[in-house]
Image (cartoon, rainbow, N blue to C red):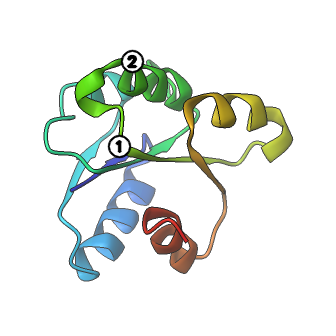
Amino acid sequence: MVLLVEDDDDLRTLYAEVLTTREYRVVTASTGREALALLDGVDVIVTDFSMPDVDGVELARAVRADPAHCCVHLVLMSAAPPEELEAAVHEVGARFLPKPFDLAHLIEAIEGR
């Protein structure tokens, strides 16, 4: 199951539709705080970096700190230059997906390619 965390309603809807048409089971959250309550059964978390409450790196740190979720595949999306987030992405063992991106890159990031 993919947990998609994006505070932009239009992008969240678009990404969820793309993943659903690819036969992924998708749950969505509009905030990092909301996402923390949806972790059970999640295999992949795709999260925006910049969110108003709990940002993507804070969410990823919380996931990595919980032994029950330590092996979840993390994808961190951001419009910020990769070099600004490189240390944080490396720290949490996430894959970085720069915005804007081709939707095929979203699938590749989820599948670990």
Q: Residue at x 27, y 50 (%)?
A: 43
Which of the image's four quarters has the N terminus?
bottom left
Q: Which mark is residue 72?
A: 1
Marks 2 and 1 sit apart, C-alpha to C-alpha, by: 11 Å
Direction from residue 96 to residue 81 in the image, left or right: right
Q: Residue at x 52, y 75 (%)?
A: 103
In the image, is residue 45 above or below residue 52? Answer: below
Q: Quadrant of residue 94?
A: top right
Which of the image's four quarters has the C terminus?
bottom right
Looking at the rendered structure, the kind of residue marked 2 is Ala
Circle 1 SS class: loop
Direction from residue 49 to residue 81 in the image, left or right: right
Q: Are marks 2 and 1 in contact (CB under 8 Å)?
A: no
Direction from residue 59 to residue 99 in the image, left or right: right
Sequence order check, earlier mark of 2 and 1: 2
Instruction: Decide: few, some or many residues near mark 1? Use Cα within 10 Å; few <14, some 14-19, many ≥20.
Output: some
The number of numbered badges drawn on the structure is 2
Q: Which mark is residue 65?
A: 2
In the image, is residue 56 above or below residue 83? Answer: above
Circle 2 SS class: helix
- The location of residue 35, given as percent across then percent down, is 28, 32
Looking at the rendered structure, the kind of residue marked 1 is Val
